Structures are given as C-alpha cells and as structure tokens.
Amino acid sequence: MDLRKLLKPRTVAIVGASEKAGFGGDTTRNYLKFSGNLDHLYLVNPGREEIFGHKAYHSLSEIEGDVDLVILCTPQKTILSLLREAAGKNCGGAVVFASGYSETGAEGKELQRELVREADRLGIAVMGPNCAGFANFIDGIFAFAFLVEERDRSGNIGMISQSGQIVLGGLDSPNMGFSHVISSGNSCNVKVEDYLDFLVEDEDTKVVAAYIEGVSKPEKLVETFRKAAIKKKPVVVLKTGRSGKAQELAKSHTGSLSGADKVLRAVFKRYGVIEARDLEELCGLAAAFSWLEELPKGERCVFMNVSGGEAGVMADLTDEFGIRLAEYHPETKAYLQTLVPDYGSVNNPFDMTAGIGYNTPVMVRAMEAISKDDHVDAICIAYTITPEIWDDTISHMVEAVSIAKENPDMKPVFWIPFIEHTRHQASADILQKAGVPLLPSGRYGCRILKQVLDFANFEYQDTEAAVPERTHGPSQGLSEYESLNYLKAHGVTIPPQAVAATADEAVKAAGNLGYPLSVKIHSADIQHKSDVGGVKLNIRDEAELRLAFETVMDNCRKNAPDAKLEGVLLKPMLKAGVEMIIGVNNDKDFGPMIMVGMGGVFVELFKDVQLAPAPLTREQAKKMLESLNSYPLLNGYRGNPVCDKEALADMLVSISEMAAKGKDSIKELDINPVFVTEEGVAIADALLVQYID
Amino acid sequence: MDLRKLLKPRTVAIVGASEKAGFGGDTTRNYLKFSGNLDHLYLVNPGREEIFGHKAYHSLSEIEGDVDLVILCTPQKTILSLLREAAGKNCGGAVVFASGYSETGAEGKELQRELVREADRLGIAVMGPNCAGFANFIDGIFAFAFLVEERDRSGNIGMISQSGQIVLGGLDSPNMGFSHVISSGNSCNVKVEDYLDFLVEDEDTKVVAAYIEGVSKPEKLVETFRKAAIKKKPVVVLKTGRSGKAQELAKSHTGSLSGADKVLRAVFKRYGVIEARDLEELCGLAAAFSWLEELPKGERCVFMNVSGGEAGVMADLTDEFGIRLAEYHPETKAYLQTLVPDYGSVNNPFDMTAGIGYNTPVMVRAMEAISKDDHVDAICIAYTITPEIWDDTISHMVEAVSIAKENPDMKPVFWIPFIEHTRHQASADILQKAGVPLLPSGRYGCRILKQVLDFANFEYQDTEAAVPERTHGPSQGLSEYESLNYLKAHGVTIPPQAVAATADEAVKAAGNLGYPLSVKIHSADIQHKSDVGGVKLNIRDEAELRLAFETVMDNCRKNAPDAKLEGVLLKPMLKAGVEMIIGVNNDKDFGPMIMVGMGGVFVELFKDVQLAPAPLTREQAKKMLESLNSYPLLNGYRGNPVCDKEALADMLVSISEMAAKGKDSIKELDINPVFVTEEGVAIADALLVQYID
C-alpha cells in the first residue's frame, strides 16, 4: 500500500476540528501552532463556520478538489461513513484516533476487521485506530493529537511507535530532532513494518527509531532491515517482550502477539539492527546517530577526563561494556606528556589534569594530537555537565571540543557525563552544532557508545532470507538412519553407517564398517532408544555383535510393542571429543534458525548457545562459534588439542544452507551430540522432523 | 585517632586566608558564604589586616585561646612549621590542600612519611594532603577549597571520597543533602576507614556514601561495616578497580594500592554494604536512602504506569533486575478494576490509564487500596517528569503521591522516570518532602530500587571477622594424606584412608579399607601426582594392588628423582557424583575467604563460583550454594537424585570455621574435587598450604 498520501499529503482535512479540549481541538491547535504552511489544510465541523479564525467546512464533500489525508477526530461509530465520504475526494490516507477496536475484546476486534476491509476496498491507508497520530516535520504535516510544548523539533530522526506515550517521551527529549514521528496505535491496514519501510526509504530520515510490541509482516520486516543494512542506515528498535510479563501486557495493550523474542533478536543481529532495552537507550541511540556527522572507522577509543577518580570509574565501565581502549602511538604519548604536569601520567582513560582541561588552546592541541594518531578511531570526553554550574572548566572543555571539531580531519568525538540531568542546554547546543553526541550518563552512555561503534564496524553480508512462504501443518520425525541420510544427501558430512534387518546382515555390514561399533534399534517409531534398551555401545567382535542384535531387538519388542522395528543401525564408535549440539528450528515468522552450543548441561544451565537465521556465510558461522563462552574448549583449552573449528564451521554452513532450502519442508533438526576433535567433526546422533503434506 | 577536633571543631583558623583566587581565597569565600556562624573563625595572613571586612591575624600564635582546626591553604614547604605552631594552640586537626606528596614519586612519598610522623608526634589529625577538604553542614564548618553554587545542601548524607572531583559531582547533584562531605585526598595519618567510621557513628548521618580507591586499614574497615550492619545504617560504596586498568590508574592517582577486588566485594556482601558501580549509582543510592522515610518491609512491588507501552518496558526491566512483582489480593484487583475503563486490565506493572493517572483523588484511592494489600511491600510510580512539560498528567500524579503519603500507613513509594534530565525541580521538591525517592531513569532506577529492597530485607548475621593479625611469611604444602588428616582433626569429615610404606603394608591396609581402591604416591614433594605416574585407580584385588604399588613407586623414582617417597596413600574408590570444588584463600587484608563452585570447566569458563569471608553460618553456606548458576545440578537436575546439600553446607561451615581459627597458619586449601551424591559428600583430593614459622 502506498503511504505517500497518508504521510506526505498535499491536502489535509481535520474532521471534527474544534476549539475545545479533546482530540479535535488539540489536533487543530497543534496543526495551527506547528505547521508553517496552512494553505493545504481544511477544517471540517458540521456545526461551525469558523475555527480559530479559519474557515470551517461543514463536511468533506463541501471541500473543492481532492483531499489526500483525512484526520478523523470523531467517535468510532462515525468512522466508516467518513472514510466513504473521503474516498469520494480521492483520499488515500486517514488517521483514526478513536479507540474501542481490537484492544477491547471480541466485539472491538470484529469492528477493526470491518474497518480494515472497508479501508482496503476504498484504497485508503489508515493510521490507527487507537493511535496518537503523526507529525511530518519535513513537510509541516501535524496530525498529532497530544499537546506538546512549542519548540523546534525538526531534524533527521524518523520515529515509529506502537505506543503513543513513548512517542511523547521522544518528543519531550530536547536532544531529539525529527523528520517524522508516527504513533501507529492498533495497526489496521498499515502495519509497523510499512512505516518502518517508509522511514528506511525516506531520504530526510538519517536514523530510524522504533518501539514495537509485535511483528505481523515478518517478510516485509526482514526486507526492510536488509535495505537499511545495505544503505547502512541505523535502525534502533525497542521491542518489549524479553520477559513473559511484558509479552502478556503487549497482548492486552494493542492486541499484538509478541514474536518469539530470541528469534527476533537473532534477526536484528543479522542485519545490524541496534537493540535498545528501554526508552533512555532508544532516545540516546537515536540522538547519537542523529548528531554524529560521520561514523568512526574503527573501534579504538581514547577517553579524556579531568579527574583521576573519574578516569578510574571510566576504566571500569569501558571494561564492563567491552569498549576497546586505544594504545597511543609512542609519539602521541610523548607529546601529551609535555602538556600535563610532571606528576601527571598519560593513560587511557586519560586524566588530562587542569593543565589541559582548564585551558582551551591546550586541550585543542591534545585532541588534535590524539585524533592524528592512527591507533585511535574516536575520542570520548567523560565529564559531567551540570545545569547549575556552567563553570570555567566545562565552558573551556565545550569550547575546546567545538574548536577541535572545526578541523575537518578530527575523528568522531563523543561526550559522556557521569551524573544525570546534565543537559545544560547551552552546552548541548554547542556540542550538537559541532556534531558531538552528548550521550546519557555513565552506563547508558557507555552502552550507547559501544553500540554506535559496533554498528560503525558492522559489515553486512547479504544473503537471501529464508522466510517461509506458507503456514505449515502437521509433522513427523525420521529415524536416526533416515535423518543422517537426509543430511548426507544435502551435503553434510556424516560418519559411515549401515542398517541390518538380521544378525547375519549386521555381521556383513560390520565387515565394511570395522569394529568397535555401536548398535541401535532402527525404527522411526522409537525416538528415545536408550529408554527402551535399544542401544549397545563398544561392540568389539562378531560374537558381541550377534548378542547385541538379539538383545536390542528383544528389548524393543518387549518395551515398545507397538513400534515397527526395521532392524538395527550400525556405526563405528566415534572418537570422543568436545560435545557440541547443532539445532534447526523453523520459526513460523522468520524461517529456519540455526542454533549451536556446547552439549550437556552447558546449554540449559548457562544458556551458552548462539542463534542465527539460515543461511549462514562461513564468516557468520565462525563468529557464532567464537561468541560461545565455551569457545575456549574448542581452542586448545588447558593443553588439550585444538579442535578442527573449520570443519565445524563448514558443517554449520552446510546445515544452514540445507535448512534455508528446506524452509517449507524441515520443521526441526536436532544434532546431539556432534563430537569435535583435532581431526574433524563427527555427528553421533541426529533427529530430523519434516512437515507432512 | 580522635577526629572530633578535625571534623567538629569549636574554633577554626584559615591559614593563607585571602581575597584572591586560589586555595586561600576560595576557601575563605566558601566559609564566609556558607557558614551561618563566623564567631569561631580566625583568618590568618601575615600580610593583611583585614580580609573581606573581617579581622586578619598575622599568625596562628597571635590568636588568643585554642584553635581546634587549622585549614592550611599554603604551599607544601610551609606545612610542617605551621603544624608545629598550631600544636601550640592545642590544635587537633588540620586540612592540608597542598599537593606534591605521595602522588608524585619517591621524593613526594618521603615528604608524606615525614608529614605523618610529625602529625602523629603533635597529635594532629591531618586531612589530605592533596585533598579538596570537607564541609560539615551540621555545625557550619566549611574547609572546602572548590567553589560551588550557593544553595542549601544540608541534609543527612555523609559522603567521603578519595577523589575531589567526585565530591564535586555529589555536591552538584540537586537531590543530595549532606551532613558531612569529606575529600580525603592522599590520606595521611587519617585514612578513609577512619572517616567512614566517623560517619557510621555520626547521629546526623542517615546514609554513608563513599568513593574509595584502596584499603589501608582492613580491620577497621570490617569493624566499621559491622557497626553499620548492626545499626542497619546504609553504607554505599563506589570502589574502582573492577578492571585491571582502573587498578593501575588508582595507583597513579592517589598512590592507593587497590585491594583484591573480588575479596572486597565478598566483604561488602557479608555486611550488607551496597555497591555502586559508577557515580550515578552512588548518588542515586545515597539520595534514595536519604529521602526514604522508612525501609520497605518486604520485596514485593507494584508498578504504576500511564501507558501500556511503558508498562511493557517496565515489565522487562523488573524481570532483568530481579525485582519481585506483587500479586494483588483478589479484592484489591477487583477494586482497581472499578477505577479503570472497561477495556483496561489490572496488571502489575499496572497501566492506570487516564482514568486513574489524570485524576488526583482517584489515584490517591488506587494507591491506598494497593498499599493496604498485604501482598504488597512498596509502590513504584514509573513516569517521566520532563523539565519542559509540567503538564496536567504529571502534576496530578505528583499531587496524588504527595497526598497519598500523608496517610501514615502508606507503604514506601518510589518514582522512576524513563528518560534522563527529568529533575523537574518543583516535582522533585514535592516528592522529597513526601519522602518519595525520585530515582534516576530506567535501568539505573531499577537497579537502585532492587538494591534498596535487598538492603531492607538483608538480615545481618553477626560473626567475628577473621582478619589476620600479622603479615605472613613463606609457606609449604602438605601431602594429600596430611592435608586430609588436618581437615579431619578440625572436624571436617573425610573418607577412610591409609598410608603404606611397603606392598605388604598396603595389602594389610586394604583389608580394612576394602576394594576397589585408589593408590597414589605419598610424598609432600609431589603435588601433581598424575603427571609423574603416581596414581592408579580401581584396584580390585591384592594382585592388582601389589602391581600398582610397584608401578607407582617405580614411576615416581624415575620421574621425580629428588622427591622423598614415603610410600603410597590408599583410599576406597568413591562413588562419583556432582563434582564440586571448595577452596580457602587467606587474603592478606581480609583473612580466609571460602570459595565454592562446580568443578571442572565450570569454574574457569563460566566463573560460577561464590566467595565469602570465613567463618560461615549454616545459612550463609546454604545461600552460597543456592547462588551458583549450577545449583540445579545439586538439586535433582533432569531426574537425577537430589544431592545431599545439607552435608555439603555442613562441610563448608566446618571448613570455614577451621579457616577462621587458622587465619594465621593456613595459607590456602584446595579441595578438588569433592563428590556430592544423594548419600553425602566425599572429598577426593585436598591440598593444604601452611605458613612456616
């Protein structure tokens, strides 16, 4: 659906325009107050001739010419007929503030379905219902129902939120300047994903900030993220639902069904989407990208302080948040040493002392020397800007930063205060003008800096997403033998194996496989083979094999009387190694997700697994392994041999490619364990579940 | 040393008082500006008759009567003679701003030692050198060198910091009201621990906030913490040095040697000392305790929001920070349901909707109903107070909270905003007056709330600390047999064991112990027995035993030719179980620390260990076990039997008591592993290292 008439209309009508408090009056007041140009605006109210000195129309039909957008400030029961009337004016967009739809219960849900049907039929893109509307600061369109203080809020942040209050939070933040602000409400025939796509495409939007409660168009979402990744446009998302409680609340709030959260997070990671965990992070990240003129070219930072104590605090924080501290070039260090008193030492974090921090020209020289150092990618000033005390130190430092940034070669500079309410507005304005993001305090600031650095250094590897094309039905598991053969047929290396219906066949097969062997029951009906006595390990010769065959078959006949037994599965005993697990889970929204982790209790107690959408590139597979806490076990831990991680990465890639191709046939795959040794990888057990059609 | 003349003097002289900028002038100006009473103050300057209209003395000697405190604003080289002169006026305290002491190098360190010697000889408690001084807001004493904006800062927070800048950060924070503020600088003959003790004892101080870089009087520190724990006075500490980098910086900053950080953290935990990780947490925690009228009586909170989106964000944050959400009594829920619109649902976090949030009397009723619910211990309003928009919603809510708190039965109430710079001062003042802490935003606020709740619910168990009395010298390891016997002699249960010098003796001992057995070399000189072929397991009969005896002895003769071999150690094979490790490490400052964790790779890769000072009560021991991530493995994981955790806790207690008693003889103990099964605990190997004296 084309959103241009909704979000960038040439003509706009406020239906229910008024001078009174409430949706009609507040929207009218906002529009008149904030929009520089009112030529395109019609006010509609059947009972008024004039509103705030502007002509009022009695109905939409009375307006001559087309109306691209109608802002409906009227109650729910008027909406459908107004939409029909609007359609007669070639309307393509409507904002519906009214509530009482899907957020209320069964009846409301039916009303919303009816609204969607009618809007689709009329070709009108509807924002809402139950929304706060939007503001387009580029074209001066203010379809926004909540009053906010008069102030220039224009800028380059495009914000979309499923919660009106959260939009207000953003609008109230003096550091945020917007291209577009959208409160989508219940989402009717235009979804959050559509707005996101609009903002990613929009040339006036430098950074996209989104609050989302759920996903309804996963394919569109992924395609939008992919576009943003290719453009390297930062998309910051706050998604509630990390906890079960929040998922429950989102459902009752806008009727959204929260997507599987870990899966969504893996999707974010794939496309470099930046995750905020609360409002402070959402606004702080958006403002940082908005203010920054240019992304850092690497991740090595120098921190400049004017207190030994604060330098210590910053050292702990950078360590905790994984921010890489630059090592100065010896020349830089020697030069800086000339700027501080004898007892001062040049560290990183760097306690500049009064010698530098209280002296503008000297601080400019220090920043220039640090910026010129090719071991340094960014500079961060860590100092509290109090609103109360605009003292010499701070004004010197802000001035120095502002002068230093006039040098076109100056590397990106950030500012992190230590204590809250540090938006001394005059300082903030100077820093913003200089392109120096003033981040939130302490830990917030550090995490935001780290995320900006990560985004700057993120290299997107474009692969085609494997989002399923349809809803899948019932499924069925394969036997271990069939599962392994399926893997083999799709290019995944498996150890030799054979099935045997009789003891004689088993002995014959053993001749090819070699002893020692494992013997397991071969039956698609038995998934937990050990539980029914269906496994014998370390079979060393023919006699043991014959005995094992009979024992396994007897046990299973007795313990699983309904299972169809096809004989036994024979495999050479594998060399034990590090036990890993590999899994595939086909998410209904985002398709097959590849999981890898250390086997056994590691997975469950320490949640030490990595998840990523299929397919994987080799580099992505390696990065997953390296991100495991237990990675050292693969890498020559305590004098053990270094495992063949390349082979494991290859296997992950093959499995992920198989899973991507099988997005409409594979439900899940559980490889548990796969042994990794210095000689390679060997799958010890596998279970594949397929959709039946 | 008595600090009363230093911190609560009856008469004060500023030496080097002046009208010019600099230490002398700034201190004089501050004193005159902030102190209500100047009768006790003498200004001393040899070259002036009058300073800011007050009489100036040419020297200390010229003053009639005693001078309790001298504030020395003069250069380093004048200090010693001034101290001597002050001693003649019965002086008992001095503030030394001058730098150039231990922070500068070898020469400065010697100057500081000389200063300490002289101050001790004269009986003068010296603050500094290289410090910013102190302010006593209770008695109006302002020995503070840095200029701060004029504003009433008096209150009940006692702050002590080794960094002057961090004191300034606290003073600049408009939410902080102080009893005392102390910048200790280099610490000379008065240490951070002494100031802490003063503040813990001080009746005007309700909460103590400390920034420390290092510990120099561990015994005093522990005793002070213990006093605070018994009084239940909150002590909030920001200690840098979690990272190696910060430890390095602290050393160069005030010459402090950072204590072993994990040990200090374990000590904090023992006494309920609250740890801040940066300045925002330090100030936020101090202000929270300062404003709060009464601690919550439990940990169950209700969160009140006016937005579904923000309620979702809060649900995720409470989950992440482990804040327990109250379950309403059904009556409360039913009542609240009558206050919200039909579509609103009563959850926790509770989206009050406009029905409650925009209506003062209704919100008061809602808060009263929630407060009366005996499933609820505290209420937290989560809403952003912007400085720009003091709109109806917020003023209604602040008003409602303020009215609700007039009810003497109202449970503790907190306020967490979502976005920074939310110190709308008029709101903050109303909330402070109502005893409702206005916490920093989002994640900071949640962590602070959690720490306040933890402190409120912390029950201190008084035990005598085992701080060592002397510096220990060289040490020596015992053999496994001796180590185990040492444990046994100190009340720790060990499995049966025997040593045998010959094969015949071994066979005889085996008769008592029973087969199967393990055979290990018995020698205090061999610590890694397996490495030299000194271990044989699963010995099933006499023949195997004789062979094992000879093999082990031969291997060791060959592979450890210099070791004195005393024969072999025989032990019955233990039933394998969950492998745990228990360790004791005798910290040079804080004495024996007990460590417990899951054995093997868990400890190293997942850092899944708990540490606590010896001795342990049974409850403390159990809490340590329960705090392990791997605790489920002891507790019937995946259908395994439930291990005998009681026996394990008992063993921890016995070992901790042994370690506390042995604080001047045991250097370390390494029990690795101890097997825990449903039947009990069994130590499989132990190594004790003792000091030799």
Image: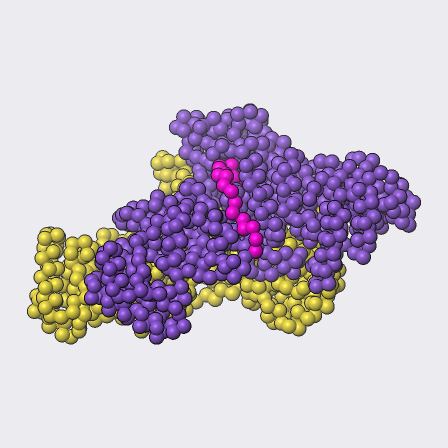
Chain colours: A yellow, B purple
Q: Is residue A210 above or below residue A361?
A: above
Q: Residue A243: where, in percent of width, then height?
A: 41, 45
Whether residue A135 appears in this view of the structure is no
State the image quarter where residue B100 is shown.
bottom right
Q: Position of residue B677 (x, y in %)?
A: 29, 50
Of the 4 image quadrants, the one containing the N terminus of chain B is top right
* Left or right of B473 on screen, residue A408: right
Query: Toward the viewer: B506 or B483?
Result: B506
The reply, left or right, for residue B535 in relation to residue B527 is left
Q: Residue at x 44, y 28 (%)?
A: B374
Identify which residue, A487 or A197, lies in the foreground: A487
Please identify the quarter of the rendering in which residue B178 is found. top right
Residue at image position (47%, 29%) is B370
Task: Using the rendered image of the protein, determine whether residue A550 is visible from the camera's viewpoint.
Answer: yes
Where B176 falls versus A384 (above or below)? above
Q: Any magenta on residue A75?
A: no
Between B9 and B243, the one nearer to me in the picture: B9
Q: Position of residue B139 (x, y in %)?
A: 74, 36
Start-end of magenta stretch: B444-471
Question: Where residue B538 sits in the image (x, y, percent)?
Answer: 25, 62
Is A218 placed above or below B563 here?
above
Residue at horizontal 68 percent and vertical 38 percent from the top: B179
